[in-house]
Amino acid sequence: MGPIGIELTNVCNFNCHHCYVDKGKSTVATLSFKQYTKILDFFISTDSINLFLTGGEPFMLNRFDEFYSYAIDKGFLTTIFTNGFILTDKIKLALTQKKPFAMEVSIYGMTDEIYSYITRVGTNCDVIFNNVNWFLKQGIDVELKYVAMKHNLHQLDKFIEYVKKNSIKHSINPALFPLLNEKHLETNFRLSSSELDVIIKKYPQKIKVDALQSQIRCDAGDLLYITSSGNLKGCPVLTREYSINWDVMTTYALEEIVDDIKLNINNKSYKYCPAWEELENKTKISSILKVKL
């Protein structure tokens, strides 16, 4: 089985314009530690070892150190997805005592002005880059993911200059999905096809577009994702969720769900990322990616 993703909480310290989770429509949810341990105990029994912890913002969790330590002690290769702004002494201690397999930090710009506009909260981005430097000094494997959109595109070159100067693993992600709970997206944030074309040509090895285009292999079903409500999905953006009683969950029941996820994807004629197609039509996606249907 592929990686297991767990959304520890859907609470976030940012309120980004582009986020596919609509804070105005979503019910606040956080996994209890008891439910979380049951989920991990189940998956370790299936020989799954690759885990990523995400949110919301996982570092918003008061007991993050306990959640994280439990995963490490169980033997999971644990990756943390974060926006990098929160880093308490308690979190530092947990990460120092037991290093994660990797960390992925989403970056939204290179100045306070752009960060504050995109995240809709006053943000000192020096805090984020100082935290990134702390991760690196601990010997943690860090990847910075630049979320490219119209409002920070002019700072992309500065980001590339920064990561190259500091020899930091990095990627560029231009995919902005519609909101999960209503078919709406502030499309003025999304790059135009011509803007996308420019950065694909300029940074062909770093921009993640191939995973969205036609002839892809969807990992849903191999990848499994548990929401902060304890439900199971094929990936964070797929709309279909399976309600699970983790007290009585069995390997056989999981296999049936995995088969159902894969069947739902394979039985439909998707040309792009299935999660994206569920939320937007193929014609619109083809115009965004500047490819022919």
Image (cartoon, grey):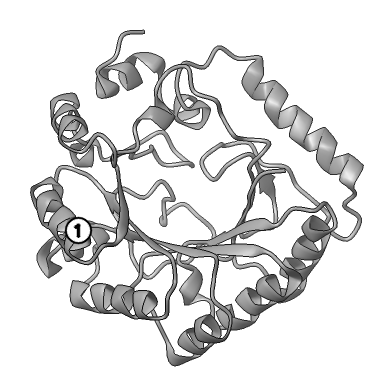
Tag count: 1
Q: Is residue 212 left or right of residue 225?
A: left
Q: Quadrant of the C terminus?
A: top left
In terms of image quadrants, where is residue 67?
A: bottom right
Figure quadrant of residue 8:
bottom right
Q: x, y (%) of residue 287?
A: 26, 18
* Amino acid type for the residue under numbered disc 1: Lys
Task: Provide residue 71's location: percent of width, then percent of height.
Answer: 68, 70
> Residue at the spot x=28%, y=49% of the render?
147
Residue at (46, 52) in percent of width and height: 25
Q: Nearer the viewer, residue 260 or 103?
A: 103
State the residue at coordinates (25%, 34%): 204
Which of 123/217 is in front?
217
In the picture provided, is 105 more to the left or to the right than 238? left
Horizontal and vertical percent position of residue 70: 70, 76
Local crowd size for mark 1, using a 10 Å CA cut-off: few (<14), some (14–19), many (≥20)? few
Q: Image quadrant for the N terminus?
A: top right
- Locate residue 139: give its quadrant: bottom left
Q: Residue furthest top?
A: 293
Question: Going by the picture, which residue comes out furthest to the left?
Answer: 154
254 lies above or below 138: above
Q: Secondary structure at mark 1?
A: helix
Query: Is residue 28 at all visible to an observer of this figure?
Result: no
- Residue situated in front as seen by the camera: 89 or 200: 200
Residue corresponding to mark 1 = 164
Above or below residue 50? Residue 264 is above
- 256 on left or right of 112: right
